[in-house]
Image (cartoon, rainbow, N blue to C red):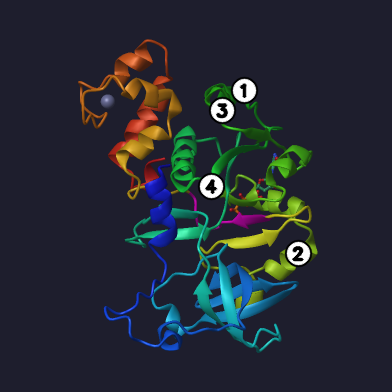
Amino acid sequence: MTLARRLRDFDEDDVRVRPGRRGSRPRTRRRPAHEDAVTGFVTAVDRGRYRCLLGDRMVTAMRARELGRKGVVVGDRVALVGDVSGDPDALARIVRVHPRSSALRRTADDTEPFERIIVANADRLVIVTALADPPPRPRMIDRCLVAAHDAGLDPLLCLTKSDLASPDELLAIYAPLGVPYVVTHHATELDELREHLTGRTSVLVGHSGVGKSTLVNALVPEARRAVSHVNAVTGRGRHTSSSAIAFELPEGGWIIDTPGVRSFGLAHVKPEDVVAAFPDLAEGATRCPRGCDHLQPDCALDAWAAEGHADPHRLDSMRRLLANRADTDTD
Ligand SMILES: Nc1nc2c(ncn2[C@@H]2O[C@H](COP(=O)(O)OP(=O)(O)OP(=O)(O)O)[C@@H](O)[C@H]2O)c(=O)[nH]1
Ligand SMILES: [Zn+2]
């Protein structure tokens, strides 16, 4: 990711209160001080209520009006004022969102016409894929790799259900690309996975039934899950929104489950950034005609793949992404 892109990610959403042209407004009016604000970590969002971890207590908060249209998402660090006691009826206010180190975004599906940020401040994307039942979908893996690359998150391929099928075929594709991976079954032997997660903020993404809940249950002890759980916000048995939810790991760090997010619409990703996320093809693309969209007959990538530099399926996968980046259903 380019520096410009990173800077844009961090700043575009900030509330920047610029001094008026004459710069004459008193400082206190321009930027409310809230010097007594404390910093919380947003673990869940549901219907305008934000669950924030503050030290060792959970505080429910709402947005302060002064936030304007600034979005608050899971993973955000926020400044809280008001009643931060964490008592059952207490409601704090979020007055600021601290600058983000990363923003994982998706574009739109049918119900969401705009690009939006799903999780802030994560540094790893764990792509959970079952080796069977449901069968793996390499095109969905490729799409997630593009999303990770775009957001500046380190990918980790987590291949589950190895008791049902061998990982060899998938690993033959992704290991040479340098994508780190772990292979699990029944959420046992998780030491290697824990090593990848400890001390970091990792987002889990994967289709229904791949074993995400099984992993979360094994990684996060009951007590911590209970505190983080969005039920605490809504009182509902199971969260119904597609919002992400963060769980604290006993070893340190966070895993963020994204129940409603099966994949990513990528319409917001520029074609050259899609190509950049395919290292096996990016080199070949330097042979392409200027401005090549890699979808026309004069694209050099067909020859590149035919010469054995890249797997033709990967080329096909990249072309599908380029052709319909917004459409998550084609995977
Ligand atoms: N054979 C086998 N089954 C597994 C494994 N991990 C999970 N399962 C089973 O796969 C099914 C789906 O697992 P979940 O953990 O609920 O999957 P999920 O990804 O959370 O699915 P959703 O809740 O629908 O998003 C359950 O019946 C699990 O018992 C595994 O390693 N091997
Ligand atoms: Zn091309």
Asked if residue 266 is positioned above or below residue 111 in the image, the reply reads above
**Cβ of mark 4 under 8 A from ligand 1:** yes
Q: Secondary structure at mark 1?
A: helix
Q: Give me the C-alpha separation between circle 3 and circle 1.
A: 15 Å
Residue 193, quarter of picture: top right
Horizontal placement of 291 versus 184: left or right?
A: left
The amino acid type of the residue labelled 2 equals: Arg
Q: Earlier in the sequence, mark 3 or mark 4?
A: 3
Give how far across and how far down residue 274 sits, in percent: 37, 37
Which residue in the structure is indicated by mark 2?
Answer: 224
Disc 1 marks which residue? 168
Q: Is residue 324 left or right of residue 224?
A: left
Taking the image in four quarters, ligand 2 sits in the one at top left
Residue type at mark 3 is Gly
Q: Earlier in the sequence, mark 4 or mark 1?
A: 1
Q: Quadrant of the C terminus?
A: top left
Residue 234 placed where, x, y %? 60, 77
Which residues fall within the magenta stretch?
254-262
Q: Position of residue 145 (x, y in %)?
A: 48, 39
Residue plotted at (59% across, 79% down): 80
Q: Residue at x 38, y 61 (%)?
A: 12
Q: Nearer the viewer, residue 122 or 109?
A: 122
The residue that label 3 is drawn on is 178
Q: Residues within 10 Å of mark 3 (few under 14, many from 20)?
A: few
Q: Is residue 133 visible?
A: no
